[in-house]
Amino acid sequence: AIADANPGAAMDFLSFSGIGGKAVRFNRSGEFVYEMEDGVACYKVVDGALVAIPGCEYDESEEAFIFNTNVLCNYVFANAELVIPA
Protein backbone atom coordinates (compact mmCIF):
# COMPACT_ATOMS: atom_id res chain seq x y z
CA ALA A 1 0.00 0.00 0.00
CA ILE A 2 2.88 2.38 0.80
CA ALA A 3 4.57 1.74 -2.56
CA ASP A 4 1.26 2.05 -4.45
CA ALA A 5 0.51 5.42 -2.78
CA ASN A 6 3.96 6.78 -3.71
CA PRO A 7 4.76 5.98 -7.35
CA GLY A 8 8.14 7.31 -8.41
CA ALA A 9 9.56 7.54 -4.89
CA ALA A 10 12.63 5.45 -4.15
CA MET A 11 11.97 3.62 -0.88
CA ASP A 12 14.01 1.21 1.19
CA PHE A 13 12.11 -1.00 3.61
CA LEU A 14 14.03 -2.39 6.57
CA SER A 15 12.56 -4.80 9.11
CA PHE A 16 13.89 -6.00 12.45
CA SER A 17 11.98 -8.50 14.53
CA GLY A 18 12.77 -10.41 17.65
CA ILE A 19 11.06 -13.35 19.27
CA GLY A 20 7.39 -13.47 18.33
CA GLY A 21 7.82 -10.71 15.73
CA LYS A 22 8.19 -8.00 18.38
CA ALA A 23 10.60 -5.08 18.08
CA VAL A 24 14.14 -5.62 19.32
CA ARG A 25 14.83 -3.55 22.45
CA PHE A 26 18.11 -2.63 24.13
CA ASN A 27 18.93 -1.26 27.58
CA ARG A 28 20.89 1.64 26.10
CA SER A 29 20.28 4.04 23.25
CA GLY A 30 22.63 3.97 20.30
CA GLU A 31 23.16 5.75 17.01
CA PHE A 32 21.37 4.19 14.04
CA VAL A 33 22.89 5.00 10.65
CA TYR A 34 21.26 4.01 7.37
CA GLU A 35 23.08 4.88 4.14
CA MET A 36 20.95 6.06 1.22
CA GLU A 37 21.70 8.46 -1.63
CA ASP A 38 19.48 11.56 -1.80
CA GLY A 39 17.54 10.74 1.36
CA VAL A 40 14.67 13.01 2.34
CA ALA A 41 12.34 11.26 4.80
CA CYS A 42 12.51 8.46 7.35
CA TYR A 43 9.59 6.69 8.98
CA LYS A 44 8.87 3.81 11.28
CA VAL A 45 5.90 1.56 10.69
CA VAL A 46 3.53 1.53 13.68
CA ASP A 47 0.43 -0.68 13.42
CA GLY A 48 0.70 -0.57 9.63
CA ALA A 49 0.94 3.24 9.45
CA LEU A 50 3.95 5.46 8.71
CA VAL A 51 5.15 7.66 11.55
CA ALA A 52 8.01 10.15 11.20
CA ILE A 53 11.01 9.18 13.32
CA PRO A 54 11.69 11.92 15.91
CA GLY A 55 15.21 13.29 15.64
CA CYS A 56 15.97 11.54 12.34
CA GLU A 57 18.22 13.71 10.17
CA TYR A 58 19.77 13.16 6.78
CA ASP A 59 23.51 13.87 6.77
CA GLU A 60 24.48 14.81 3.21
CA SER A 61 28.21 14.38 3.83
CA GLU A 62 27.66 10.82 5.07
CA GLU A 63 24.75 10.19 2.66
CA ALA A 64 22.92 8.60 5.56
CA PHE A 65 19.96 8.94 7.88
CA ILE A 66 21.04 9.19 11.51
CA PHE A 67 18.97 8.95 14.69
CA ASN A 68 19.26 7.58 18.21
CA THR A 69 17.14 4.70 19.42
CA ASN A 70 17.02 1.78 21.79
CA VAL A 71 14.37 -0.05 19.73
CA LEU A 72 14.83 -1.65 16.30
CA CYS A 73 11.56 -2.07 14.42
CA ASN A 74 10.25 -1.65 10.85
CA TYR A 75 11.48 1.36 8.89
CA VAL A 76 10.94 3.07 5.54
CA PHE A 77 13.61 5.40 4.15
CA ALA A 78 12.74 7.50 1.09
CA ASN A 79 14.06 10.08 -1.34
CA ALA A 80 10.80 12.10 -0.98
CA GLU A 81 8.17 12.89 1.64
CA LEU A 82 5.71 10.02 1.40
CA VAL A 83 1.94 10.03 1.13
CA ILE A 84 0.61 7.96 3.99
CA PRO A 85 -1.97 5.51 2.63
CA ALA A 86 -5.41 5.45 4.29
Image: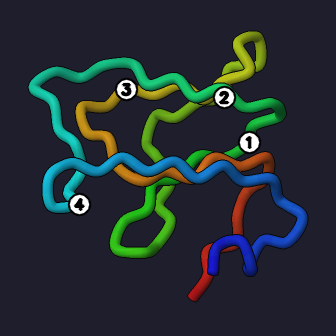
Q: Callout 1: few (<14), some (14-19), or many (20+) C-alpha neighbours within 10 Å?
A: some
- How far is the residue under mark 2 from the one under mark 4? 28 Å
Tag 2 residue: 58
Q: In this figure, which residue is indicated by the disc labeled 1?
A: 40
Sequence order check, earlier mark of 4 and 3: 4
> How busy is the neighbourhood of tag 2: few (under 14 within 10 Å), some, or many (20 plus)?
many
**Rounded to the nearest whole Å, what is the CA distance between mark 4 and mark 3?**
22 Å
Residue ID for mark 4: 21
Dot 1 falls on a residue whose secondary structure is loop
Q: Nearer the viewer, mark 2 or mark 4?
A: 4
**Image height check: is 53 above or below 35?**
below
| 7 relative position to 52: left or right | right
| Badge 2 vs badge 1, beta-carbon distance below 8 Å | yes
At a point 16% along the width and 21% down the height, the residue shown is 28
**What residue is rendered at 66% in x and 24% in y?**
64
Look at the picture and state if 52 lies above or below 1.
Answer: above
Give me the C-alpha separation between circle 2 and circle 1: 7 Å
Looking at the image, residue 40 sits to the left or right of residue 1; the answer is right
Q: Earlier in the sequence, mark 3 or mark 1?
A: 1
Name the image quarter holding residue 47.
Answer: bottom left
Q: Could you tell me which secondary element the residue under label 4 belongs to?
A: helix
Q: Earlier in the sequence, mark 2 or mark 4?
A: 4
The amino acid beneath tag 3 is Asn
Location of mark 3 (residue):
68
Residue 10's place in the image compared with 86, above or below, is above
